Amino acid sequence: MLNYIRLNNMNLQDVFNDFILQKRLSGLSDATISDYNNMIGIFLDYAGRDLELERVTQKFVNTFILDLYERSLSKSTIATYIRNTRIFLCWVYQKYYLPFNPAIIKVPKPPKKLVHIYTDNEIRLIFDSCEASIPWISARNKAMLALMLDSGLRQSEVCNLRCSGIDRERRVLQVTGKGAKDRLVPLGYVSLLLVDDYLSLCPYQKAEYVFLNRNGSVVTCNAVKLFVNRLKKRLPFELSSHKLRHNFATNYCKDNILQSGNSNVFDLSIIMGHESLETTKRYEHFAHEIIALENRLSHLDSYVYKI
């Protein structure tokens, strides 16, 4: 009876406000909250934010999904909208009840995209292209790139990295990831050299955070994004912070497979801060693809060579 009373006195906007409140109370970042607002907002705007919960039926949600397919959206974008809508509706179902269980909503698999693994020459070009007019800014840019490429850090984790989080003796970093969860990630020797080179040149020596902008404030995610976008325009291939993280993960699996025959994908999921092992396993597949190509054998080539 209580659920029925709630059902008849709540609309989508009411429960969405409660949903966002609970997510904030659980410690989610402003960026994640913004993503929820944007992604679930598509469904709310389609349905009408004052729509009563009793009218949110499976048939109604199906019409929303069909409407997404009729828009000029990529399959990956459609999958993201449906996934976030299902997350929201499952939360509503558990707390307020709905006429159907949203867990049955199927999220389409986005098309598989190949990960471009940067060659040694491309990596050299990336670092050579990020020079700035101010030497310590150039050093900062190289250090940020190194931590995304060789430690798998997200943009937000680069920005939130504290000086106290650098363990030089063990060569590890303590970073704060999604959900304000701390974890340890490896710090390569070259990356450490680049970070220390930047810190020695940075004019703000007593700062709490590692990466600063020109006025001494903590560098923002937007600033990192703009820097990477400017850098991309100088390069003959695609570049993004996420592609650098993809490279780290794929190379991690590849190197482990070649050394031990095991990708150590479980360890990688911990290093990357993934909630689900399935998210990490795709890098294992990419690594096997690269190894298979590098070890390719051409029967025709050997035949022609004999001729």
Image: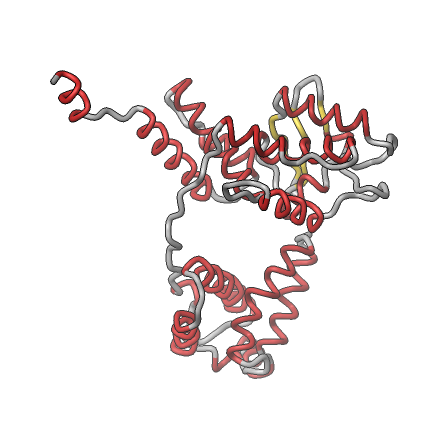
Please identify the quarter of the rendering in which residue 74 is found: bottom left
Question: 9 or 49: which is nearer to us?
Answer: 49
In the displayed structure image, the side of residue 260 where residue 128 appears, left or right: right
Please identify the quarter of the rendering in which residue 70 is found: bottom left
In the displayed structure image, the side of residue 3 where residue 187 appears, left or right: right
Q: Is residue 159 above or below residue 304?
A: below
In the displayed structure image, the side of residue 302 where residue 164 appears, left or right: right
State the image coordinates of residue 185 (x, y, percent, origin top left): 61, 30
Write the residue at 65% across / 25% down: 191
Colour setup of the view: secondary structure
Question: 261 or 123: which is nearer to us?
Answer: 123
State the image coordinates of residue 260 (x, y, percent, origin top left): 40, 18
Q: Is residue 175 above or below residue 186?
A: below
- Disc tally is 0
Write the residue at 39% across / 36% down: 286
Q: Is residue 236 above or below residue 14?
A: above
State the image coordinates of residue 32 (x, y, percent, origin top left): 63, 55
Question: 230 or 283: which is nearer to us?
Answer: 230
State the residue lying farthest toward the left: 307
Q: Is residue 32 above or below residue 151?
A: below
State the image coordinates of residue 159 (x, y, percent, origin top left): 71, 42
Quadrant the C terminus occupies: top left
Write the residue at 13% across / 21% down: 303
State the residue lying farthest toward the front: 307
